[in-house]
Amino acid sequence: MRIFLLSRTLLCFCFSVHGSSLPVLSEAVTYTRHSNVLLRHREEKNVSICWGSRAPQESFTIKDFELGKIYGVGSYSKVVRAKKKDTGKVYALKIMDKKFITKENKTAYVKLERIVLDQLDHPGIVRLFFTFQDALSLYMALESCEGGELFDQITRKGRLSEDETRFYAAEVVDALEYIHKLGLLHRDIKPENLLLSSDGHIKIADFGSVKPMQVSSITVLPNAASDDKACTFVGTAAYVPPEVLNSSPATVGNDLWALGCTLYQMLAGTSPFKDASEWLTFQRIIARDLRFPDYFCDEAKDLIDRLLDVDPSKRPGAGPDGYASIKNHPFFKGIDWDNLKALKPPPLALLRRNSSRNLSHAGDTSERHTGGNGESAASITRLASIDSFDSKWQQFLEPNESILMISMVKKHQTLTSKKVQLILTNKPKLFYVNPLKLEAAVNIVWSDNPNELSVQVVSPTNFKICTPKKILSFEDAKQRALHWKKAIEALQDQ
């Protein structure tokens, strides 16, 4: 285990944010190795940084980068592919809104994430290279994982084979053991936060919910510790353990529960407690309503069953045997734990986007199964055609313009939501209308360039439409989030 020895006196830099200050760690540091211990030393600001320096505060501007596709969107941030113009190096650039951070009291979370990432050193965890800022935003330049999310691989393949699951799970276990040995809780382990390098190896990402335990090797500034209690609800509904729902303090068992849910999802293609709403999902979690498909092998059933024990102290990895109880489980028979990175990863399933695809296939989710509510592409096309004859929508169309997809959705904003009619036409045009007032349509700026218009599926019902200036959040009760994504991308391909 690598241990970080840090001086308690760390240099802070204050961002000026609308009259207040937002401290973010910005010291330049170097590392040396001695007797397998990683020593971390603070350097003076103007001293040259030698090998191993981590995440310095740079004087870059956003104009120094060529921005590409959007990797993901959060409540106060988005992550985009960014190429440094002078070096050609590619990063995943996390762009955070200063105003939102201060308004929503997220300062401690941002500082903690930055400080923790600066001290983590493991091949299975995304690396933070440097940070910078401007008047509106904070920027973190993270390792770009060109293989995408593990969630995407599950979606594209329908579900993963036992061998694929075993490989990915082993790499997650290895990185999670490192995180826990440092005295940290990740608190948001899920397939969307398990990224893949270009050669297919797992990288744990998104430390926005990280929590240091009482005994931790990570040095955290007092004003950088998140101010929530360890039992505060964070993370994602489908992966939250029952003890958190019952307001019990968080432990390593929380991450182990999420590991069990992720294992299940890799093998089944869906999370174990998924239901029609978050409330119903929570009820299934509390009741431990766990059902295994017939095709699960006995070893997988046993490991998942143990990881999803209602008693967090009994989950493998949480007891006195530590992670040996996971690594020695029969499901991982044949895994060389000392040489994981030398193993050949499973081949990546690529997103099929080409000009031959058309809107008649926009409703397909995969070759293995249909969309979340079982509707086929043909039924969605018929639905759009029927609704398009409604005269109240025709008034928003131009001559020879027809509706390709239409649905009543909820448009979510920070504190409110409202129902709107979301409409996609063959022009192509994408807009929404207040169905009661039938006011002038609000156009969403169209672009055939996926870097300027993209759709991120959050869940079967929820999706985000991302443009350079806005991120719009929608909820389709008929679980057509993926249908909307495919329909828009199909038009972009034409």
Image: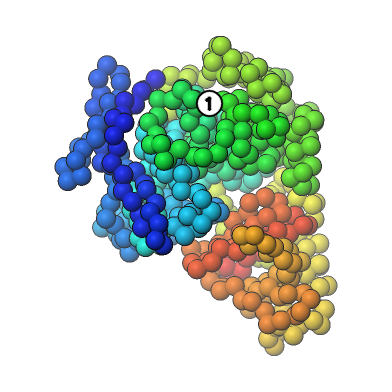
Image-quadrant location for residue 65: bottom left
Rendered position, 58 above or below 354: above
Q: Nearer the viewer, residue 32 or 144?
A: 32
Image location (x, y in percent) of residue 384: 78, 69
Coloration of the structure image: rainbow
Tell whether 150 sits left or right of 410.
left
Residue extending furthest toward the left: 47
Q: Nearer the viewer, residue 191 or 7?
A: 7
- The structure residue drawn at horizontal position 39% and vertical position 61%, both measured from the top left corner, is 19
Image-quadrant location for residue 224: top left
Q: Nearer the viewer, residue 381 or 441?
A: 441
> Label 1 belongs to which residue?
173
Tell whether 250 sits left or right of 39.
right
Residue 353 can be seen in this image:
yes
Per the image, label 1 sits on a secondary structure element best described as: helix
Amino acid carrying mark 1 in the image: Val
